Image (cartoon, rainbow, N blue to C red):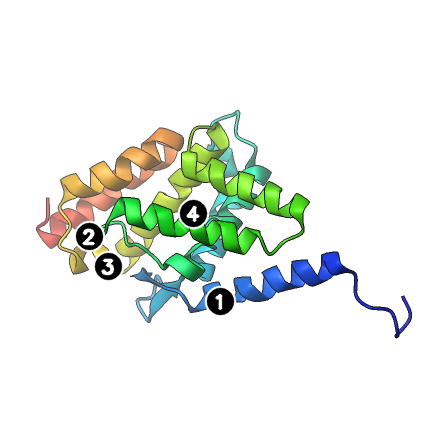
Amino acid sequence: MSQTDSPPPRLDAQMAFLIEADRLKSVNRASSLCDGSRPENSAEHSWHIALYALTLAEHAPPEVAIDRVIRMLLLHDLVEIDAGDAPIFASHDAAAKAAEEEAAADRLFGLLPPDQAAAFRALWDEFEAAETADARFAKSLDRFQPPNQNIATGGGTWRAYSVAHTTFEARVGAQVARGAPALWSWLAPRARAVFERLGQL
């Protein structure tokens, strides 16, 4: 391409999406870093659980394609650029939040060339539906990472939101166990020990 040629429109669209995706770095989550120094942001969370998937792939059910899981996890929280984070133990209108996230997915993936927009949106929709083995494992990792950070900080959001152990098991444990039973078997006693120390059993 000569210096006088214009960039291809496809690359313009891809770069517009990537520049917009940078805004995810400014969306703070309720969870803190493992060292407790500051809140984690949603971009860091997405990277970290993609690394979880790569590292813990051997603990996935045999039918799981870990490359698809990693792609889902890199995309799953982009909607928080528009919709914000919804902490699992906070009160919010689930239907309204889902509508906000759908609108965000329309806008953000719509920045891409049509073929990539369709492919990325299909992965996001699959993750949200959590009906395939890949999506169930991805959802499990999304639930599995924050408790490990809470354990590292001596309670984290469990302490901040006065979470009962039964609530944790219902909102987090059931999701982890559904897609990654081996990970739940490892996590459950460690989480319970923290809840016991907090007096929140």
Of the numbered discs 1 and 4, the one sitting upstream in the chain is 1
Please determine whether, in this image, residue 92 is positioned above or below residue 67: below
| Position of residue 114 measured from the top left corner of the image (x, y, whole percent) | 66, 47
Q: Write the residue at 47% across / 32% down.
A: 60
Secondary structure beneath label 4? helix
Q: Nearer the viewer, mark 3 or mark 4?
A: 4
Of the numbered discs 1 and 2, the one sitting upstream in the chain is 1
Q: Which residue is mark 1?
A: 23
| Position of residue 172 measured from the top left corner of the image (x, y, whole percent) | 27, 41
Q: Is residue 156 visible?
A: yes
Instruction: Write down the quadrant of residue 95 in the picture.
Output: top left
- Residue at the right extreme of this rendering: 2
Would you say the residues marked 1 and 4 are in contact, meaning their CB atoms lie under 8 Å apart? no
Name the disc covering residue 91, or none. 2
Q: Specify the amino acid type for callout 2.
A: Ser
Q: Specify the amino acid type for callout 4.
A: Glu
Q: Write the residue at 21% across / 37% down.
A: 170
Q: How much space separates mark 3 and mark 1, taking CA atoms? A: 25 Å
Secondary structure beneath label 1? helix
Q: Which residue is mark 4?
A: 102
- Label 3 crowd (10 A; few <14 / some 14-19 / many >=20): many
| Position of residue 160 measured from the top left corner of the image (x, y, whole percent) | 18, 60
| Position of residue 79 measured from the top left corner of the image (x, y, whole percent) | 44, 54
Q: Nearer the viewer, mark 3 or mark 1?
A: 1
Q: How much space separates mark 1 and mark 4, taking CA atoms? A: 18 Å
Of the numbered discs 2 and 3, the one sitting upstream in the chain is 2
Instruction: Write down the quadrant of residue 153 in the picture.
Output: bottom left
- Label 2 crowd (10 A; few <14 / some 14-19 / many >=20): few
Q: Nearer the viewer, mark 1 or mark 4?
A: 4
Q: Write the residue at 43% across / 69% down.
A: 26
Q: How much space separates mark 2 and mark 3, taking CA atoms? A: 17 Å
Q: How much space separates mark 3 and mark 4, taking CA atoms? A: 29 Å
